């Protein structure tokens, strides 16, 4: 695996690969890699002919500086995982390489900025757009891979591609959430949980399944309330438990039995903030 820390070196390498007719696939990450990330690398390898992964803990998407400070960093292990997975290129830039000047650009992502994560993490998605805009510009990929684990982020990236003419050729791939056997969605933040907390955290996926299994058309507020009680009853502090339109993420209080729905949860377990989601209707309906 080639490892580049400088934008100019990475771009010179990628340019040569492009002349060799390689199709560039790109998997942006913040490191502390686990098998969920590796499932994105695998999808990229089976779709593109050159797999580029980036590891960059992006300061502009952290609205809480403590969260940034305690974000896990396990670069030696990350390199082992990526090499074993057969990743071709790792881009590992410093903050100055990504932001030679402080980024102040703002993006019109509409209500995605206000709903759910947007409401509880003000500025988060503007930071995500800033870094993804910069990374797409540097890597200039054809295929990009994001995890459904961060469902709203996937919608934001779709929107970023839509509003940025030079990204219109990019094909976005959303990769299903990889889970532990217990159902807990794999996450870099899980390594900050004790074994007991990891077990407690499984209530989130159990609750998403509960919503899916008890969904009926009509008024959804009782189901939403029951789900919230299940999560707080297990000792977590939910920020939101939402049953939402899978396209717009607007809450659906009354279901017509047809609209595709996603259930989304964000909850604190102690000081660790966890998110998860599940499509609870068939995409076809
Ligand atoms: P992060 O390093 O947390 O920014 O995640 C990098 C990418 O990996 C994002 O597109 C995430 O949605 C994706 N990802 C994180 N966890 C999982 C998972 N459990 N399954 C699939 N993709 C994931």
Image (cartoon, rainbow, N blue to C red):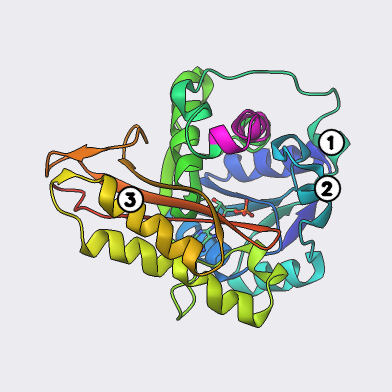
Give the residue at mark 2: 5
Give the residue at mark 3: 224
Q: Are marks 2 and 1 in contact (CB under 8 Å)?
A: yes
Residue nearest the viewer, comparing 22 with 190? 190
Q: Which residues are magenta?
A: 118-132
Residue beneath the point at 47% across and 32% down: 115
- Is residue 176 visible from the viewing direction of this image? no
Give the residue at mark 1: 97
Query: Does label 3 or label 2 sit earlier along the sequence?
Result: 2
Residue beneath the point at 75% across and 43% down: 10
Residue nearest the viewer, comparing 136 with 95? 95
Query: Does label 2 or label 1 sit earlier along the sequence?
Result: 2
Query: Does label 1 or label 3 sit earlier along the sequence?
Result: 1
Image quarter for ligand 1: bottom right
User: Where residue 94 sits in the image (x, y, percent)?
Assistant: 85, 43
The chief SS type of the magenta part is helix
83 relative to 111 in the view: left or right: right
User: Where residue 9 sits in the image (x, y, percent)?
Assistant: 80, 42
Residue beneath the point at 64% across and 18% down: 106
SS of the residue under disc 3:
helix
Q: Is residue 85 magenta?
A: no
Question: Disc 3 or disc 2, which is closer to the eye?
Answer: 3
Mark 3 lies within 8 Å of ligand 1 (Cβ measured):
no
Q: Is residue 131 magenta?
A: yes
Q: What separation in Å lies between label 2 and label 1 (alpha carbons)?
A: 8 Å
The image quarter in which residue 118 lies:
top right
Quadrant containing the N terminus in the rendered view: bottom right
Task: Please tell me the numbered disc located at residue 170.
Answer: none
Q: What separation in Å lies between label 3 and label 2 (alpha carbons)?
A: 46 Å
Residue beneath the point at 61% across and 69% down: 34
């Amino acid at each position: 695996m080639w490892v580049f820390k400088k934008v100019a070196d990475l771009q010179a390498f990628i340019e040569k690969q492009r002349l060799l007719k390689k199709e560039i696939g790109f998997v942006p990450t913040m490191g502390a890699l686990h098998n969920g990330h590796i499932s994105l690398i695998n999808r990229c390898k089976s779709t593109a002919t050159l797999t580029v992964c980036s590891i960059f803990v992006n300061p502009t998407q952290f609205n809480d500086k403590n969260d940034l400070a305690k974000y896990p960093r396990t670069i030696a292990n990350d390199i082992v995982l990526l090499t074993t997975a057969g990743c071709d290129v790792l881009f590992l830039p410093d903050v100055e390489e990504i932001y030679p000047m402080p980024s102040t650009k703002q993006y019109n992502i509409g209500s995605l900025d206000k709903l759910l994560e947007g409401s509880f993490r003000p500025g988060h998605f503007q930071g995500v757009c800033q870094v993804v805009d910069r990374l797409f510009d540097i890597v200039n990929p054809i295929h990009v891979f994001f995890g459904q684990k961060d469902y709203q982020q996937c919608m934001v990236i779709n929107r970023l591609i839509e509003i940025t003419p030079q990204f219109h050729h990019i094909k976005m791939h959303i990769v299903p959430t990889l889970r532990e056997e217990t159902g807990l969605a794999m996450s870099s933040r899980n390594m900050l949980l004790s074994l007991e907390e990891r077990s407690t955290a499984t209530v989130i996926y159990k609750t998403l399944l509960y919503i899916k299994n008890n969904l009926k058309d009509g008024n959804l507020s009782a189901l939403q309330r029951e789900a919230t009680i299940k999560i707080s009853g297990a000792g977590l502090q939910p920020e939101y438990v939402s049953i939402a339109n899978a396209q717009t993420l607007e809450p659906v209080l009354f279901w017509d039995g047809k609209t595709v729905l996603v259930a989304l949860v964000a909850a604190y377990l102690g000081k660790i903030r966890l998110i998860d989601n599940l499509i609870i209707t068939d995409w076809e309906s």
